[in-house]
């Protein structure tokens, strides 16, 4: 007869395999079409939009059938997915403000260079919104990735692991799922060694971002928190740290100030009480 610990271990193994399946299906959906065009071609983008939305329709079934029934006694299915009204406005505003504090240096550098003023011009915004690449970066990718890797995957992990462990595992799935970009780099003629190093770097920073996004989901209990932050980060892109050293007195100090302020404000600005979150914060955060 199996012990309770053995049953738990088997259950956690099943959850890991289910999460792995979610990640594999999401990435595989990008390659189901036979299309000679590159990833930036409108036809490729449209087909991939269709594929990932089909995956997003299917992926909640993994949460429904993989979640322990006791969690459904504490919350509705939509609440487990991070969709609820209580604390919604706070979940949109506070994490975005916190992330903007982290990006204080890059945002100020862009302001100094005039790029931020250009982005505020109406014709520039309208021109961007009309492009499929903008919709992919700012809407579809954040929405479908957060839905799959946070809303559908993270609650499954939280029923087996402590929050920090669940966040770490979820971020690994998210980061490794981005390694497929090596395919595009090789097709563009990039040398294998360079393509591997670039892809590993990509996996590294998406894993870090995935941990932050998962942290926001657990702390706020809202899908909209990591979704808003994801869209914002895609918009400002990975910060160009070299810019900080071109004017150390002014720019570098802003980078440091943003990072230090973020570290001090992270916990108080993500207090679950601010978001009326009692569902995912029922374990000690150790």
Image (cartoon, rainbow, N blue to C red):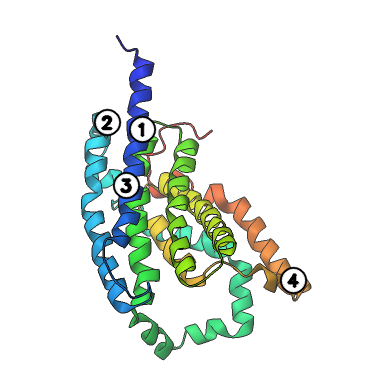
Quick one: label 1 or label 3, which is nearer the N terminus?
A: 3
Circle 1 residue: 159
Q: Is residue 91 visible?
A: no
Structural crowding at the residue carrying mark 2, measured as other residues with C-alpha within 10 Å and reported as few (<14), some (14–19) or many (≥20): some
* Picture residue at 75% right of the left edge, 76% below the top: 247
Q: Cα distance, mark 1 to mark 3?
A: 17 Å
**Which picture quadrant has residue 258?**
bottom right
Circle 3 residue: 22
Q: Cα distance, mark 2 to mark 1?
A: 7 Å
Q: Check the picture and name the quadrant holding the N terminus.
A: top left
* Picture residue at 38% right of the left edge, 17% below the top: 5
Circle 2 residue: 68
From what the image shows, is residue 84 above or below residue 115? above
Quick one: label 2 or label 4, which is nearer the N terminus?
A: 2
Q: Cα distance, mark 3 to mark 2?
A: 18 Å
- Foreground: 280 or 159? 159
- Foreground: 207 or 78? 207
Q: Which mark is residue 245?
A: 4
- SS for dot 2: loop
Q: Tell me where residue 150 appears, x and y as whole percent.
A: 37, 49
Q: Tell me where residue 136 appears, x and y as whole percent.
A: 36, 70
Q: Which mark is residue 149?
A: none
Q: Check the picture and name the quadrant holding the C terminus.
A: top right
Q: Tell me where residue 245 appears, x and y as whole percent.
A: 74, 71
* Residues at discs 2 and 1 in contact (Cβ within 8 Å): yes
- Foreground: 164 or 4? 4
- SS for dot 4: helix
Structural crowding at the residue carrying mark 1, measured as other residues with C-alpha within 10 Å and reported as few (<14), some (14–19) or many (≥20): some
């Amino acid at each position: 007869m199996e012990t309770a610990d053995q049953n738990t271990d088997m259950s956690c193994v099943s959850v890991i395999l289910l999460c792995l399946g979610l990640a594999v299906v999401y990435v595989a959906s990008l390659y189901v079409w036979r299309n000679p065009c590159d990833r930036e071609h409108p036809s490729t983008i449209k087909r991939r939009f269709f594929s990932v939305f089909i995956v997003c329709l299917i992926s909640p079934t993994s949460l429904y059938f993989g979640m322990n029934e006791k969690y459904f006694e504490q919350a509705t299915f939509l609440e487990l997915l991070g969709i609820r009204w209580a604390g919604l406005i706070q979940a949109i505003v506070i994490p975005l403000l916190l992330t903007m504090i982290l990006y204080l240096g890059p945002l100020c550098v862009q302001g100094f260079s005039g790029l931020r003023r250009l982005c505020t011009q109406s014709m520039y915004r309208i021109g961007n919104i009309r492009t499929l690449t903008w919709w992919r970066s700012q809407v579809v990718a954040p929405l479908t990735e957060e839905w799959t890797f946070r809303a559908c995957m993270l609650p499954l992990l939280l029923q087996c692991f402590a929050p920090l462990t669940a966040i770490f595992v979820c971020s690994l799935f998210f980061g490794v799922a981005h390694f497929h970009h090596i395919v595009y780099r090789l097709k563009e003629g990039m040398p294998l060694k360079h393509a591997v190093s670039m892809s590993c770097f990509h996996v590294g920073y998406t894993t870090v971002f995935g941990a932050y996004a998962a942290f926001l989901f657990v702390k706020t209990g809202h899908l909209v928190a990591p979704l808003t932050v994801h869209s914002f980060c895609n918009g400002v892109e990975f910060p160009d740290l070299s810019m900080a050293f071109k004017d150390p007195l002014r720019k570098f100090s802003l980078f440091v100030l943003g990072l230090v302020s973020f570290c001090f404000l992270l916990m108080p600005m993500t207090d679950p009480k601010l978001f009326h979150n009692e569902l995912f914060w029922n374990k000690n955060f150790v």
